[in-house]
Amino acid sequence: MKILLVSEYSRLHNSLKEGLQELGHEVYILGHTDGFKDFPVDFPLVKKWDTGLLKKVKVAIYTIFGFDMSSYLTYRQFEKNKAKFTGFDVVQLINENSFYCQYYFEKKILKFLFQNNKKTFLLSSGYDYLNVKYCFENPNFKSAIQPFLLGKIKKSGIENILKYKTKPFEKLHQFIYSNIRGIITTDMDYHIPLVGNSKYLGLIPNPINTQKLIFQPLSISNKIILFHGINESNYHKKGNDYFEKALCIIEKKYGSKIEIITTRNIPYTIYIELYNKAHILLDQTYANDQGYNALEAMAKGKVVFTGAEKEFTAYYNLTDSVCINALPDVNYLVNELSFLIENPNEIIAIRKRARTFIEREHDYKTIAELYVKKWNSN
């Protein structure tokens, strides 16, 4: 098959592409590169007028006329190369705003893709209209909506989520919904809100290329190393405030027995170099399942504090922990960290189970086969 994967922001589509190529398919990725991570894209789109003086001019134009120059310039890039985006057997959108455009230009791009290719599918692998609707209607469901409702995040800090509550994005959802063959989810955070939806085709776990992620044999003869990587723009969305408070207590409690590495907004290469040294990685508290960062860390043999709610353990029929279910609760986090520090053999056991779990449930070639079956049967 000839397949076009639209957009990339976590390495999901790159890993899927690698798996599909192993199966003999012709695969391309179209979309923006994802900032500092700079994931490979076959047909790159550049988000223009997004920094410095031009960004200020863009904001002024939008404030006065409601016209977004970045969206227009993305559309112009697509239009210039549109002949390359026809004749695909399958097009897969990574979410409902894959081109980061406002409604008018996003719809124009999508309309061309719908009309000039055989089948289109939508991934729910991030926030979208139905997911955000569910999160607001179910405030006890773990999501970034929870710290927003607690007043920890201003509207300006969560606009990329709140936009899906607006009329234009509701219209965009309906347009996409009426043109796709179905919706596929990647983990429990997106699966649960779609259960019972007529367009929902089921969950396919995130593909992980374990050939590129080496299991790292780390000894625990000296200090236990804990890593907490902070992206300031997502500080409260990820529950970093709870992790920081817990680490302060842990540092006082265990002193020289541990080493804590905390980073803020550092380049990706340095981030990876530092987190490779760690035994324990603190990922996020508002998740029900693991995102890409957590899965890659688990593949390397880290004990990851992330989402692992009962729906996750039931789905994969797990009886032993492959990661630690993180909660926005300082005392709980301190207790979980203390247990691991005082029982280093449990760190070793979880590390091994995490790697085995990734190999069994997230192998990129096996996952690619599941996508092909889903695409062919719909």
Image: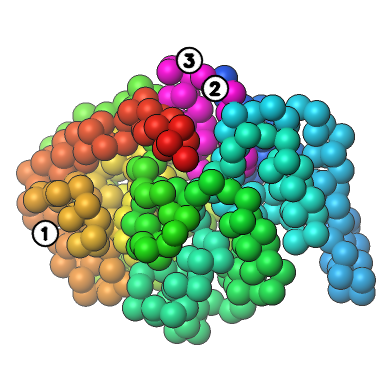
Label placed on residue 339: 1
Label 1 or label 2, whichever lies nearer to me, is 2
28 horizontally vs 212: left or right: right
Which residue lies under the disc numbered 3? 24
Over which residues does the magenta segment extend?
1-25
Residue 67 lies in quadrant? bottom right
Which amino acid type is shown beneath numbered disc 2?
Answer: Met
> What element does badge 1 sit on?
helix
The quarter of the picture where the N terminus appears is: top right
Residue nearest the viewer, comparing 363 with 171: 171
Upstream in sequence: badge 2 or badge 3:
2
345 horizontally vs 283: left or right: left
Which amino acid type is shown beneath numbered disc 1?
Answer: Phe
Residue at 73% in and 31% down? 85
> What element does badge 2 sit on?
loop
Q: From this viewpoint, is residue 350 visible?
A: yes
Residue nearest the viewer, comparing 349 with 76: 76
In three-dimensional space, the C-alpha distance between marks 1 and 3, rounded to whole angstroms, equals: 47 Å
Verify whether residue 338 appears in magenta: no
In three-dimensional space, the C-alpha distance between marks 2 and 3, rounded to whole angstroms, equals: 8 Å
Which residue lies under the disc numbered 2? 1
Residue at 80% in and 28% down? 83
